[in-house]
Amino acid sequence: MVPDGTYTAVVDRIEDGIATLELEAEDDLYALDIEAAELPAEARTADAVLEVTVADAALADVTYEADETVDRASEAQRRFDRLSKRPPRDGE
């Protein structure tokens, strides 16, 4: 069960109308399944970043964080690009 509080969350997946959110806490990671319809329309996609408030183990408030979503996607792409480069061979 997710403790009451405000969290940064990421949409992990949406399947059959159910969105699974990963909520980040200081030392813990929680999962919360909700109806996808409870999310703002622009946040109904994997990897969308949200600020959520949980009360009584249910979603009480949700805000889509557009800038944070873009920043995280850009950083992930930069890491992928770095990793996809072939390492130099001896003498290169």
Image (spheres, rainbow, N blue to C red):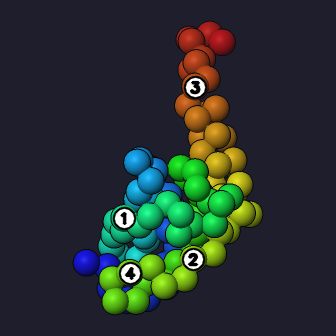
When the figure is inspected, residue 64 is found, relative to residue 72, above or below; the finding is below
Residue 29, picture quadrant: bottom left
Secondary-structure class at tag 1? strand
Residue 85, picture quadrant: top right
When the figure is inspected, residue 17 is found, relative to residue 2, above or below; the finding is above
- Tell me the distance, in whole angstroms, between the alpha carbons under discs 3 and 1: 34 Å
User: What crowding class fits label 2: few (fewer than 14 Cα within 10 Å), some (14-19), or many (20 or more)?
Assistant: some
Does residue 21 appear in this view? no
- Tell me the distance, in whole angstroms, between the alpha carbons under discs 2 and 3: 35 Å
Mark closest to the chain's N terminus, 2 or 3: 2
- Tell me the distance, in whole angstroms, between the alpha carbons under discs 4 and 3: 40 Å
Q: Which of these two is toward me, 55 or 82? A: 55
Question: Which residue is at 34% across, 75% downward?
Answer: 27
| Place of residue 19 in the rendered image (x, y in percent of width and height, measured from the top left) | 44, 58
User: What crowding class fits label 4: few (fewer than 14 Cα within 10 Å), some (14-19), or many (20 or more)?
Assistant: some
Which residue has dot 4 on it? 58
Disc ID at residue 62: 2
